[in-house]
Image (spheres, coloured by chain):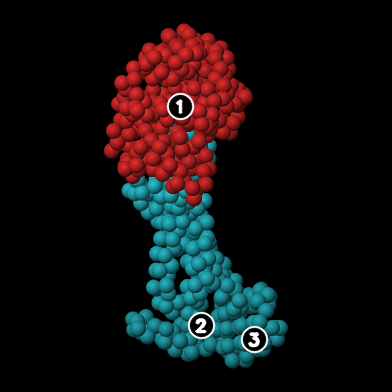
Amino acid sequence: MDITFDHVSKNFSLISALKDISFEVKQGEFVFIVGSSGAGKSTLLKLILHQIKPSSGNIIIDQVNYRQAKKWQIEKIRKNIGVIFQDFQLIADKSVEENIALALDIINYPHAEISAKIDEVIKKVNLNNRRFLFPSQLSGGELQRTALARALAINPQVILADEPTGNLDPYNSWNLVKLLKDINEQNHTTIVMTSHNNDIVSSLNKRIISLENGEIKTVNPIKTKVKHSKKNEPA
Amino acid sequence: MSLLKHTWHHLRRSPFQSSIAILIMSQMLFIVSGFSIISSGLSKILKYFETKPEITIFLKDGLDKATVENFQKELAAYPSIKEIKYLSKEKALSLYKEQNKDNPLLTEMVTASILPASFEVSVSDPKILEQISQNISTKTNIVDEIIYQKDMINSLLRWTNLIRQAGFILTVLIALTAFLITSIIIGMKVTNRKDEIKVSRLLGASKFYVQRPFLLEGVIYGCLGSLIGTIFSSGLAIYFRSQINTFFQPIVFLPYEPTFYLTIFAITTAIGIVIGYGASLVSVKRYIKF
């Protein structure tokens, strides 16, 4: 599932969140979107998900141009995108298990296999003893991991992660990034991740799209692994 | 998560709203089923009189025996006559006394002279009654009044139609109320679950996917309302059946067959489903725009 932004701008009234952005993410790539707060990182992810529409330009996902896309095509694309929202977007009156089950039900995952799939992803994100708890009973990190579990459960072609390490301690942050890296390498899943954490961004030797005031400042295809602080990385 | 589980989740999370919707639906379907039962009884009364052709001819006072006998012969000459019964003034008095034996005030002042003699003519072909009625109505020197089944049936039909119309208007009014209340309740539930709907849509759910639980909820309100409404109306009918049927004897106003009550249940369920689904559809179309 390729992602193409072709001269995309997004305005909110008089404010320009993104200005004439063009880039391409190929299937299986791992791309970091970096930039200061208000640079337009979350807006960019929302545009990929068609949560908001661009003011101008074209967004082409999986060869479908959103401008000409039918509703069912957008729904199909969304079913192949696992999202970790910055504000988690978990359903308050559903347990961890039910939140994950909802995502599986939406993609028509076989009902008989849902429970086993939940077991698998819950184990993967280390939420074993939180399965039946509700979002209000979880810590920030646990909420983040629940959102990750929901995204992973559907075996997506693309994972959009909006500041997924924002609420995690360094140990869990590295664990999460390692998990995303493994998924990217093993399943050839495209990962588009926004982050403030320079250590993580620089450690993975992946392409970085740097945004500043809604414009692409640099697209940095890192060739060599940048030395990073090893103290936070799990053994 | 199956659709039923999802819908049950909605019902469980707002039990008060759900109970109100079920209650109003039950009231509406109680009235619908109640009027259906009454309407069926009224139809039986009509059918009974329609299939029992009779005419009563009241005679003028002071007729001699020969005139009465000649008149009886004239009546007997018509085809399809089953029976001609003569009721003299004295017999009419004894019948009147028998009918009002519990009310002596009504019988004290009445004598045979003020009651008319009459002929009760029953036929096998109801069409002949019209002919008899037309012919004898010209004999004003003999005939005082004709009570013809047709008049009685027409009068009964007027009352039956009036009751049916009143029932229909009442049903429409309460159905409209049930529709609006269910629609408002589902609308409130949609608003309460806005975040869930939004998230589901972002995860790729179709509009119909997020609408389904609310539509099913409306259908469940209709089914439960029908079940409760019919249980109450049929329960009352069965409880008072013997008294009512004795009153209308020989007509069986309230039937004994379970199939009758099952049919009523099926009809009210269909009405409940249509109203519940319709009300939910209006709400989800109005509130789920994203």
Label 3 CA crowd tier, 10 Å (few <14, some 14–19, many 20+): few
Residue B36 visible? no
Foreground disc of the pair 1, 2: 1
Of all chains, the one bearing label 2 is B
Residue assigned mark 3:
B82
Q: Colour of chain A?
A: red
**The image quarter in which residue B44 lies:** bottom right
Report whether B269 appears left or right of B69: left
Which mark, residue B116?
2
Of all chains, the one bearing label 3 is B
Q: In percent of the image, x 69 and y 83: which residue is there?
A: B80
Name the element at disc 2. Answer: loop
The answer to whether tags 1 and 2 share a subunit is no
Residue toward you, B72 or A85: A85
**The image quarter in which residue B83 lies:** bottom right
Name the element at disc 1. Answer: helix
User: Three-letter amino acid code at disc 2?
Assistant: Pro
User: Three-letter amino acid code at disc 1?
Assistant: Lys
Q: Are marks 3 and 1 in contact (CB under 8 Å)?
A: no
Foreground disc of the pair 2, 3: 3
User: Which chain is assigned cyan?
Assistant: B
What whole-number distance in Å separates the C-alpha atoms at marks 3 and 1? 101 Å
Looking at marks 2 and 3 on the same chain, the residue that comes earlier in the sequence is marked by: 3
Residue B258 visible? yes
Q: In percent of the image, x 56 and y 25: which residue is there?
A: A27
Query: Residue A155, percent across and down?
Result: 50, 36
Q: In percent of the image, x 47 and y 83: which residue is there?
A: B115
Query: Residue A214, percent across and down?
Result: 45, 11
Q: In percent of the image, x 42 and y 39: which residue is there?
A: A121
The answer to whether tags 2 and 3 share a subunit is yes
Label 2 CA crowd tier, 10 Å (few <14, some 14–19, many 20+): many
Residue assigned mark 1:
A181
